Amino acid sequence: MDGESIEEQVYVAMGSNLGDRDAHLAAGVAALRATEGVEVIAVSPLYETDPVGPPPQGPYLNGAIELATTLTPDALLERLLEIEVNQGRRRGPDRNAPRTLDLDLLLYGDRKLAGPDLEVPHPRLAERPFVLEPLSALAPDLVHPILGETIEELARRVRDPAAVRRRNPSSRLQPTRSTRSS
């Protein structure tokens, strides 16, 4: 990574409910691993979750990824969107429509950004058990930069074990943690 760039700790949510969900999530993680300026530090366990959008659609697989990156927030968002498209994601008018791959930038260091295309921390992070459970598995003590509460505290508030169910590891995407020294 560029020695002059500041490396940031970043968290990304991932989800899929179309086609081979495991393969879509594994491809998303692999694409991030292959991205210059991005290092995948950890991948959470996967959770099967009920869809939020209108029926008919199947259950989601959701997880979270911890990254270290020198990319700017906008450059990282652009890369996440590119990875989604490469995995067959097609955006329509309904933001809760089924998708092959969804990658959401949740947290970018302790930055607070509010632009037309990117808001960080993710504006609905604290209300979404399907995001908070995997994120809490990676970083339970991480403090939300606006709310001042830990991810585990936020997760505990909205936890619903019937709707967000930990899934047995797939053969394609195992929970991981880098051996990188911090």
Image: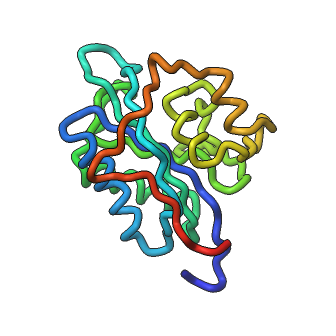
Q: Residue furthest top?
A: 55
The residue lying toward the viewer, choosing from 13 and 85, is 13
Q: Is residue 167 left or right of residue 21?
A: right
Q: Nearer the viewer, residue 141 or 100?
A: 141
Residue ranking furthest to the front: 168
Which quadrant of the figure contains the N terminus? bottom right
Which residue: 59% across, 30% down?
124
- Quarter of the picture containing the C terminus is bottom right
User: In the displayed structure, would residue 12 be above or below residue 50?
Assistant: below
Tell me what residue is drawn at x 49 percent, y 46 percent.
64
State whether residue 143 is above or below residue 74: above
The residue sitting at 54% across, 56% down in the picture is: 66
- What is the tally of numbered marks visible in this picture? 0
Residue 31 found in image quarter: bottom left
Where residue 147 sits: x, y (%)? 77, 34
Residue 146 quadrant: top right
| Residue 137 image position (x, y, % from top left) | 57, 43
Which percent across, then down, holds residue 91? Answer: 30, 37
Residue 22 in the image: state x and y as whole percent: 27, 44
